C-alpha cells in the first residue's frame, strides 16, 4: 500500500505523541464559565504573544475572523480587504450572513495591498453609500502564495485606516510562519491592528482551535458572539493544551517547512511546461500552473494522488502544495521525484498523455 504524502494543506497535521500526552494530562474546568485553567493559560499566553490585552479561544480561525467582523461592524457597513483573502473566498459568505456587511475587495500583489488602495476604496460619508468601517489584512497571504506582508506595509495600512477612523483586523492564521520567515516578532506585526486571529491547526500542528485577540472591551463583546455562533465549550482544556504545547515546540521548526517548500518549488520548476515563480515561495505554500502541460489541475492532482502525493487544485490549471510538520524533507524529495515522473510525461496539446 502506498503511503500518502499529504501536501494538500497544513491542516493535515496530526498531533504528535508528545502533544497527545500533554493534552491527556491537562487540567480542565468549565470553559464557558471561564473556569478552565488550560484555556485561560492559553488565552493569556497568546494575548502576550500578540501584544494584546486579552484573547479568546475558539473552535476555528473562521469563527475567529467572523466574530471579529461582527464585533467591529454594523449591518450595512463595508469591509476593505484583498480579493483573495480567506474571509472573502473561503468562509461560506459569513460576512454577509452573520454581519450583513459588504466586502470592498482590492486587487493586491500576491495578496498584499497598499495604503493608496485603502484610501481609494474608502466611501465618502454619504447616506447613499455603505459606511466603510473595517480594514482587514491576511498574514501570511494564503492564496497569494504564502506571501509575507512587509512590516512597513502592515504599519502603513494600519496608519491609513486609523487616520480615517476605521477599525483594523489581521487574519493571522499563519502569522507564526511570517514571524519565522521575517524575523519580526508577532507583537510587532500586529501593532496597529485592533484584533488578530491566530490559528493553531495549521503549521502549529494542533488538532483543533484558534484564538482572536484584542483589547478587553473587544474581547468582552467577542465572547457574546462566541456564544451566539455556537462556539462556547465546556472542558476544553484538553484541546487548548495542544496550543500550549505547540507554542513551546512547533514555532521555530516552521523554518523546516519553509526550506522544504523551496525544495519542492525548485524541483517542480525543472519540469518543462510547469509555470512557477520559485523566488516568490516565502513560507510553506507553493503554487504552480500546469497549463503548459496541456492538462487541467484536476487531472494533474489525480495523477499525483494515484502515486501517493496529495496536492490541491485551486483553479483550472493552478495547483497548491503546502509543507508542514508531517512532511519530511525526504517526503518532499519523493514528491518531486513523482511529479517529475508523472507530470513530466504530459505533453502540451495531448491531455490524455501518460
Image: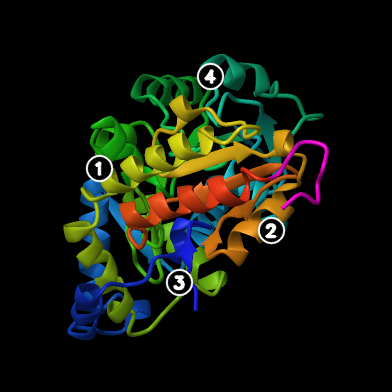
> Which dot, 3 or 1, sits closer to the camera?
3
Percent coordinates x, y for residue 314 in the rendering: 66, 48
What residue would you read off at disc 2?
92
At mark 2, the secondary structure is loop
Task: Say whether disc 2 or disc 3 marks the residue closer to the N-terminus.
Answer: 3
Q: Which residue is mark 3?
A: 3
Which residue lies under the disc numbered 4? 114
Report the Cα–Cα distance between label 1 and label 4. Answer: 24 Å
Lower position in the chain sequence, tag 2 or tag 1: 1
Alpha carbon distance from label 2 to label 3: 32 Å
Tell me where the magenta segment starts and ends, as one range: 346-354
According to the picture, the residue beneath numbered tag 1 turns out to be 51
Q: Are marks 2 and 3 in contact (CB under 8 Å)?
A: no
Camera-nearest residue between 299 and 160: 299
Q: Earlier in the sequence, mark 1 or mark 4?
A: 1
In the picture as drawn, the residue positioned furthest to the top comes out as 116
Instruction: Name the element at disc 3.
Output: loop
- Camera-side residue: 300 or 113? 300
Determine whether label 3 and label 4 are within 8 Å by CB.
Answer: no
Of the image marks 3 and 1, the number of the one nearer the N terminus = 3
CA–CA distance in space, label 2 to label 4:
26 Å
Q: How far separated are the C-alphas under marks 2 and 1?
A: 30 Å
Using the image, tell me which numbered label, if any, was put on residue 269: none
Amino acid at each position: 500500500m502506498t503511503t500518502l504524502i499529504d501536501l494538500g494543506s497544513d491542516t493535515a497535521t496530526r498531533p504528535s505523541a508528545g502533544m497527545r500526552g500533554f493534552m491527556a494530562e491537562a487540567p480542565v474546568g468549565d470553559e464557558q464559565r471561564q473556569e478552565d485553567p488550560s484555556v485561560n493559560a492559553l488565552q493569556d499566553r497568546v494575548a502576550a504573544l500578540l501584544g494584546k490585552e486579552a484573547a479568546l479561544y475558539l473552535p476555528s480561525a473562521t469563527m475567529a475572523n467572523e466574530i471579529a467582523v461582527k464585533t467591529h461592524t454594523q449591518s450595512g457597513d463595508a469591509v476593505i480587504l484583498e480579493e483573495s483573502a480567506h474571509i472573502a473566498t473561503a468562509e461560506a459568505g459569513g460576512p454577509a450572513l452573520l454581519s450583513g456587511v459588504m466586502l470592498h475587495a482590492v486587487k493586491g500583489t500576491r495578496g498584499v495591498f497598499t495604503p493608496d488602495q485603502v484610501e481609494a476604496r474608502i466611501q465618502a460619508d454619504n447616506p447613499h453609500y455603505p459606511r466603510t468601517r473595517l480594514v482587514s489584512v491576511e498574514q501570511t497571504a494564503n492564496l497569494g502564495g504564502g506571501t509575507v506582508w512587509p512590516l512597513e506595509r502592515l504599519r502603513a495600512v494600519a496608519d491609513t485606516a486609523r487616520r480615517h477612523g476605521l477599525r483594523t483586523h489581521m487574519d493571522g492564521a499563519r502569522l507564526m510562519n511570517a514571524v519565522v520567515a521575517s524575523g519580526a516578532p508577532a507583537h510587532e506585526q500586529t501593532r496597529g491592528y485592533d484584533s488578530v486571529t491566530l490559528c493553531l491547526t495549521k503549521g502549529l500542528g494542533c488538532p483543533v482551535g484558534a484564538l482572536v485577540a484584542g483589547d478587553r472591551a473587544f474581547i468582552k463583546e467577542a465572547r457574546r458572539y462566541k456564544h451566539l455562533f455556537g462556539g462556547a465549550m465546556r472542558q476544553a482544556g484538553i484541546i487548548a493544551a495542544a496550543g500550549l504545547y505547540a507554542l513551546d515546540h512547533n514555532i521555530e521548526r516552521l523554518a523546516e517547512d519553509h526550506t522544504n517548500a523551496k525544495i519542492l518549488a525548485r524541483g517542480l520548476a525543472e519540469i518543462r511546461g510547469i509555470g512557477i515563480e520559485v523566488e516568490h515561495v516565502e513560507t510553506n505554500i507553493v503554487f504552480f500552473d500546469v497549463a503548459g502541460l496541456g492538462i487541467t489541475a484536476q487531472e494533474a492532482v489525480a495523477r499525483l494522488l494515484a502515486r501517493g502525493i496529495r496536492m490541491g487544485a485551486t483553479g483550472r490549471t493552478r495547483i497548491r502544495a503546502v509543507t508542514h510538520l508531517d512532511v519530511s524533507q525526504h517526503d518532499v524529495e519523493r514528491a518531486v521525484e513523482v511529479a517529475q515522473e508523472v507530470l513530466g510525461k504530459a505533453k502540451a496539446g495531448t491531455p490524455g498523455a501518460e
